[in-house]
Image: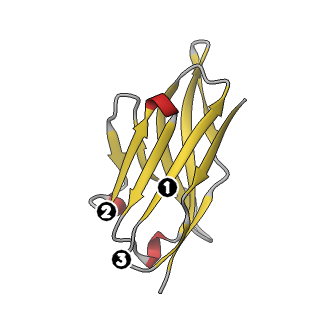
Amino acid sequence: QVQLVESGGGLVQPGGSLRLSCAASGRIFGINAMGWYRQAPGKQRELVATITGGGRENYADFVKGRFIISRDNAKNTVYLQMNSLKPEDTAVYYCNAVLMRFGSTYEAWGQGTQVTVSS
């Protein structure tokens, strides 16, 4: 069983910054991509950013130039540096990992961390 534990959410003023962290633990044979998704009230969950094991990054258009995803493979941890935050960034942010096991892959999700951008 693999667990993803997020941290770093909270309340921040517009224009501020937050850094989210997500650490994977448990019976891990290998991790392919890791990423962040978010879900605002009344909306569907949407992709924010992903990063491959080789470090290739992918961002949703609405965060390009503001958010930076990174990972520490030795620690099985992914980060999301969020800058120039806007009220519309308010959402629950979920960590995602694509894990490898015996020649196949499966996904794991974190429990989510609330990010609120408000003055």
Q: Residues within 10 Å of mark 1 (few under 14, many from 20)?
A: many
Tell me the residue at 38%/48% (across/down). Answer: 69
Q: Position of residue 78 (x, y in %)?
A: 47, 42
Q: Amino acid at mark 2?
A: Arg
Q: Is residue 32 above or below residue 49?
A: above
User: Which mark is first along the chain, 2 or 1?
Assistant: 1
Query: In front of the other: label 1 or label 2?
Result: 1
Separation of marks 3 and 1 at Cα, in angstroms:
16 Å
Q: Which mark is residue 20?
A: 1
Q: Taking 92 as reference, is 74 left or right?
A: left
Direction bottom: furthest residue: 119
Direction top: furthest residue: 102
Q: Amino acid at mark 3?
A: Gly
- Please give the residue where the numbered disc 3 appears in the rendered image: 15
Tell me the residue at 57%/27% (across/down). Answer: 99
Separation of marks 1 and 2 at Cα, in angstroms:
14 Å
Q: Position of residue 86 (x, y in %)?
A: 40, 75
Q: Is residue 14 above or below residue 74?
A: below
Q: Residues within 10 Å of mark 3 (few under 14, many from 20)?
A: some
- Please give the residue where the numbered disc 2 appears in the rendered image: 66
Q: Secondary structure at mark 1?
A: strand
Q: Position of residue 51 (x, y in %)?
A: 40, 39
Separation of marks 2 and 3 at Cα, in angstroms:
10 Å
Q: Secondary structure at mark 2?
A: loop
Q: Secondary structure at mark 3?
A: loop
Q: Quadrant of the N terminus?
A: top right
Disc 1, disc 2: CB below 8 Å? Answer: no
User: Which mark is first along the chain, 3 or 2?
Assistant: 3
